Image: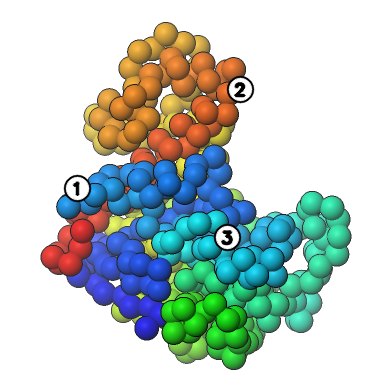
Amino acid sequence: MALKFEIGNTAASGGRRGVLTLPHGAVQTPVFMPVGTAASVKTVEQGVLERVGPTRTDGQPRGAEIILANTYHLYLRPGHELIERMGGVHRFMSWTRPMLTDSGGFQVFSLSSLRKVTPDGVEFRSHLDGSKHFFSPEHSMDVQIALGADIAMVFDECVETPASWERTKESMGLTHAWAQRSKGHFEANRHKVPWHAEFGGATQNLFGIVQGGMYVDLRRESAERLVEMEFPGYAIGGLAVGEPREVTREMIARTLEWLPKDKPRYVMGVGYPDEIEEYAKMGVDMMDCVLPTRAGRHGLLFTRAEDGSVVRMNIKRKEYAEDQGPIDANCGCMVCGRYTRAYLRHLFVAGEPLGLTLNSIHNLHFYLATMDRVRAELAGSPVFL
């Protein structure tokens, strides 16, 4: 079986406690997934990823149970054919736990003036060297099959914000057509990579992506259309692209109403710690964002005030130059247990790469600890560790 999703308890708010079992292991949900854009969670090596975050109930480190890799970036460099020859992205980057690859659609969307969208797919120029490329739903599937992550995503178009209802409707129609093409090509070709046989051919799953911009009626139409296609899981895409947070929340809340209750539900590309906590309590099972490591590399650290609210700390500030305290006295991460604010500020100001690593580790721990706390609040089954 390529995917099994068990729900142990559902709260009145809609949040639910679950276990998502994939070929490379089990994932406790709701889960935050660190982003490893180019088969690397920036500045943090895989052994640390396996230990970061709170421990399980049996005292063993939980670590990041699932991470992302980016189809667009790996296609350009080093190339999906090379990664396939290396035995897939898991072997290539020495990561034995579950992984998800996006479709490349959002990255192509973000190229703006460097792309041309047609019903067949998207022609674009590489941000690296300006070379011309073409992504169709079928090509996105071929790249993701070669990469071999546990979860792949259909190729979609993410509409700009703001966009008119008419423009959004047109884009959504393209996404639905591409989703059907993605599914057909994926199912016909998913077993053709030789090393997939290690898992009896059941190495990958394809999730649909709900679009519809900031229009409730289009979100409903998109969700219902994708549910008809029968995917093993569903993502909510096209959010956190500049709209107000209350709009993001409304689109998530309404879309959840129309997605199957017995399948994993994934919101793509969100968000700040308080946001992922809120969305998890609404019933979102999976979320990802580059923010923990990106913020860390810019000296922004997340802590909690006494009332539990999230505080953003700029470690570059001069006030921390002689501060002997940890980032957060209540944090159990390996950074707060050893290093002072003064030292972390020194590393950042001096341009020492170690500072970027330590900041990123702390922020990843903060995100994973946030989800750990939410899962504890939603607990309701002894199968969960």
Residue occupied by mark 2: 351
Residue occupied by mark 1: 59
Asked whether 106 or 238 is in front, the reply is 106
- Which residue is drawn at the image coordinates 43% and 64% (left, top)? 98
Check disc 1 and give the amino acid type. Answer: Gly
Neighbourhood count class around disc 1 (C-alpha, 10 Å): few under 14, some 14–19, many 20 upward: few
Q: Earlier in the sequence, mark 1 or mark 2?
A: 1
Neighbourhood count class around disc 2 (C-alpha, 10 Å): few under 14, some 14–19, many 20 upward: few
User: Which label number is shown at residue 313?
Assistant: none
Q: Percent position (x, y) of residue 95?
A: 47, 58
Q: Earlier in the sequence, mark 1 or mark 3?
A: 1
Asked if residue 358 is positioned above or below residue 201 in the image, the reply reads: above
Q: Percent position (x, y) of residue 212?
A: 56, 71
Q: Percent position (x, y) of residue 186?
A: 58, 84
- Which residue is drawn at the image coordinates 33% and 17% (left, top)? 325
Check disc 2 and give the amino acid type. Answer: Gly
Neighbourhood count class around disc 3 (C-alpha, 10 Å): few under 14, some 14–19, many 20 upward: some
Asked if residue 192 is positioned above or below residue 152 in the image, the reply reads: below
State the SS at label 2: loop
- Spatial separation of the CA atoms under disc 1 and disc 3: 30 Å
State the SS at label 3: helix
- Which residue is drawn at the image coordinates 53% and 63% (left, top)? 91
Check disc 3 and give the amino acid type. Answer: Phe
